[in-house]
Image: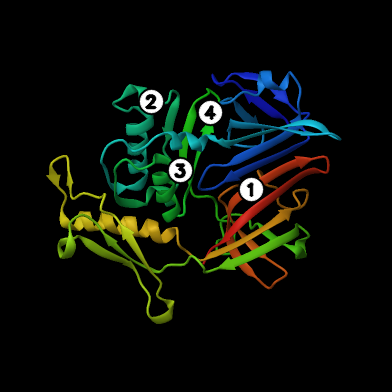
Amino acid sequence: MELLILNTELESVDILDNFESLIWTERYCGYGDFEIYTKVSPEIFTILRPDSYVWIKDSKQVMIIEGFQIKFDAETGAHLIITGRSAETLLDRRIIWAQTVLSGNLQNGIQKLLNENIIAPTITDRAIPNFTFQASNDSVVTALEVEAQYTRTNLYDSIKNLCAVNDIGFQVRLSETNQFVFELYSGTDRSYDQFVNPYVIFSQKFDNLINSNYSESQKALKTVTVVCGEGEGVGRKTTIVGSGVSLVRRELYTDARDLSQTVDSVLIPEVDYIAQLAQRGIENLSENISQRTFDGQVDTTRMFKYGEDFFLGDIVQIVSEYGIEAKARVIEVIRSQSTSGIDVYPTFTMLD
């Protein structure tokens, strides 16, 4: 793989292809990251600078250089480790500055958050140049609704939680005109549960799953949360989200006192305020779920190739040697290159 190096003005300045190893990780609902391991040379520091960008041809994600580390060994000499995260972390540089209510279409709500805090904020110093929003036509995305309220919360965390709750992804890609383009997406269903798209199956039977790891844990699982908003004592606004009885009921407390029923001197209707509290509870429960993941090394020379037959966020069919057969979403893809070659490691989350 060749790494294209861009300066802080997003201008191409060099190509790096003589590194010893590269790990490039992309994620469906969150930022990705990378690590380059290479020998130290005077030239390397002239092209790899903090806040510069790294991009590979086969990826939609552009990475931002954030850190350097030099390691010296008497036998192998000095090596440089360059690390960073993808452009989705630009959202992490902003908070939701003012009290903001989202009501109605989810995509419109997220666009509002971006407009007011990155694209066209009232405080012009907060604007990020060349950052745009690209509306999705995906019916899965356009059908989603939201009732939520945010004040001074981190913009990245807020948008990530909204997407995670609704099982959709987001990305900030670099366009041909050097603009950062924010998009929502849901991936394509390529499992046995549909008849429109060609199936994508990973199985030892097809010799396209070289090795795999399956894990399942209910350690963090919570099924019910009581959400408490503004007010004191018995007068405090509350609602309950989730369900469960007896041993399957696992309870969680959600403090939502930051949600106010009065916004811009206007009283929010009780039903809308309770819906905002419920949204906070849903987000909290979504961070405390049972985990079922399946990761493995895929042979990209056979049958199904990443970037051609399936993509990040797609739903595929998994058939393992453990007797596990289920549809699963591709939530992460790790591409690595070293002296042994190029490998692709997808991580799947099982879907019920």
Query: Could you say whether the residue bearing mark 2 is in a helix, strand or loop?
Result: loop
**What amino acid is at disc 4?**
Ser
Q: Residue furthest bottom?
A: 246
Q: Nearer the viewer, mark 4 or mark 1?
A: 1
CA separation, marks 1 and 2? 31 Å
Marks 3 and 2 in Cβ contact (< 8 Å)? no
For marks 4 and 1 on the same chain, the one whose residue lies earlier in the sequence: 4
Foreground of the two, 199 or 166: 166
Marks 3 and 4 in Cβ contact (< 8 Å)? no
Query: Could you say whether the residue bearing mark 3 is in a helix, strand or loop?
Result: strand
Classify 10 Å Cα crowding around label 3: few (below 14), some (14-19), many (20 and above). many
Query: Could you say whether the residue bearing mark 4 is in a helix, strand or loop?
Result: loop
Classify 10 Å Cα crowding around label 1: few (below 14), some (14-19), many (20 and above). many
Q: In the displayed structure, would residue 286 be above or below residue 137?
A: below
> Pointer 3: what residue?
184
- In the drawing, does residue 102 fall left or right of residue 160? left
Q: In the displayed structure, would residue 245 be above or below residue 336?
A: below
For marks 1 and 2 on the same chain, the one whose residue lies earlier in the sequence: 2
CA separation, marks 3 and 4? 15 Å
> Pointer 2: what residue?
127
Q: Position of residue 94 (x, y in %)?
A: 40, 34
> Pointer 1: what residue?
333
Q: In the displayed structure, would residue 185 be above or below residue 350?
A: above
In the rendered image, is residue 172 in sight?
no
For marks 4 and 2 on the same chain, the one whose residue lies earlier in the sequence: 2
Query: Could you say whether the residue bearing mark 1 is in a helix, strand or loop?
Result: strand
* Res. 297 image quadrant: bottom right
Residue drawn at x 45%, y 53% is 164
Residue drawn at x 68%, y 21% is 45
Instruction: Identify the disc placed on residue 175.
Output: 4
Classify 10 Å Cα crowding around label 2: few (below 14), some (14-19), many (20 and above). some
